Image (tube, helix red, strand yellow):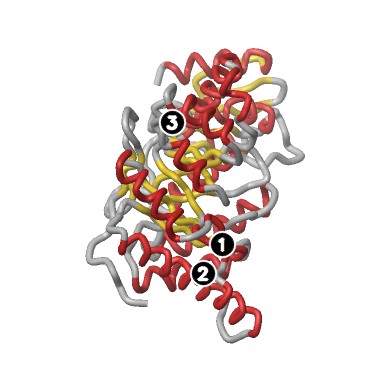
Amino acid sequence: MANIYKTPRIIQAGGKGITKKILVGGSNPVTIQTMWKEPIDKIKDDDEALHELLKKINTLQSLGCDVLRFAVPDTTSAESLVKIAANTSMPLVADIHFDYRLALECLKGNVAAIRINPGNIGSRDRVEAVVNGCRENGTAIRIGVNTGSLPKDLAEKVENGTLSRAKALAETAARECQVFEELKFDQYAVSMKASSVEETILSNEEFAREYDAPLHIGVTEAGPLITGVVKSTMAFTHLLREGIGSTIRVSLSSTPENEVITGREILHECGLRKGGVTLVSCPRCGRLGFDVHGFVERWQNRLLAMDKEITVAVMGCVVNGPGEGKHADIGIAGAGDKAIIFKKGQIIRTIDVKDADNVFEEELNSL
């Protein structure tokens, strides 16, 4: 594989009319993506459904989501996505498999990017049609490669053990990049995804050694919440600390909100995302004096959506309250049949548990 780049690509995730632009690659911040979990075909003719979806998009955006991807399996879904894109500033990505004409349908609107898997999109002329449409519309492309879409010659080498699956993923991506370069189109990112942490790391390292196209990293089909968080954290932390990865998506058998929050926390712990609320909470034990789990569940999304650079501590008892939580700008903990509100380790109010949410809100708003 020859290095066909000299400088990192910078992709503007935002087509014609999009009011919010996201720059991907180069020295730009690592962006967080998630994917919508439900079909969108009904949106085309249902304004109420559109309104509800837009509210959820706003929630994702407030939690730190930069880009949102939608599956587009048919023409009605493509038309629905065009309608959604016309009503939000969130950069939207159309996820296209098999039928290149669906990509062209999405390009009739303000879709920010098209994700195609050249391994199943068909002949080169179909790829070229998508590239030309994106060029005309100012739309980016993500080249998506996975272990199920390897070219026949590489798949055979993997099968007979003469080529690792990780190297096959990188070589497949390199071939597709070459096609885009021949078409003189450079507004693209690349993703190579496997369900294995090791293969995800190795394929991205292999590609990054010779190419500097922006990489979208993720462990595909990572599993349910706990399994998926563990796998994604291991893979992302390793790659991001090597400087590999311009945009991420945590793939969970869970909600888009949990995917965004996980991605946000990984970037924060890697020192790649600044600002916002840092939420710390104790795991709870036999000294329990306060329903930590219930309080966190009620407040988590609201806190993470706030435009405040503060640390919030939610503790079960006074042992883990103002003591271990003394660094927090504001915290709440149990104290027998009461709750205490503290700031920087100093107790400022002792209240009935039933008043905890209201009093906490008052003190939070005073910061």
Closer to the camera in the image, 78 or 287 = 78
Q: Mark 3 points at which residue?
A: 329
* Lower sequence index among marks 1 and 3: 1
Q: Distance between the residues labelled 1 and 2?
A: 7 Å
Residue 120 x %, y %: 56, 58
Q: Mark 2 points at which residue?
A: 169
Residue at (30%, 73%) from the top-left corner? 3
Residue 256 x %, y %: 58, 37
Q: In which quarter of the image is residue 111?
A: top left
Answer above or below: position of 169 versus 314: below
Q: Which residue is outermost to the left? A: 6
Residue 241 x %, y %: 40, 62
Closer to the camera in the image, 231 or 23 = 23
* Lower sequence index among marks 1 and 2: 1
**Within-10-Å neighbours for mark 2: few <14, some 14–19, many 20+:** many
Q: Is residue 291 found left or right of 280 in the rendered image?
A: right
Q: Name the residue under label 1.
A: 146
- The type of residue carrying mark 1 is Asn
* Lower sequence index among marks 2 and 3: 2
Where's the N terminus, which quadrant?
Answer: bottom left
Residue at (54%, 45%) from the top-left corner? 262
Residue 12 x %, y %: 31, 43
**Within-10-Å neighbours for mark 1: few <14, some 14–19, many 20+:** many
Q: Is mark 3 on a helix, strand or loop?
A: loop
Q: Distance between the residues labelled 2 and 3?
A: 46 Å
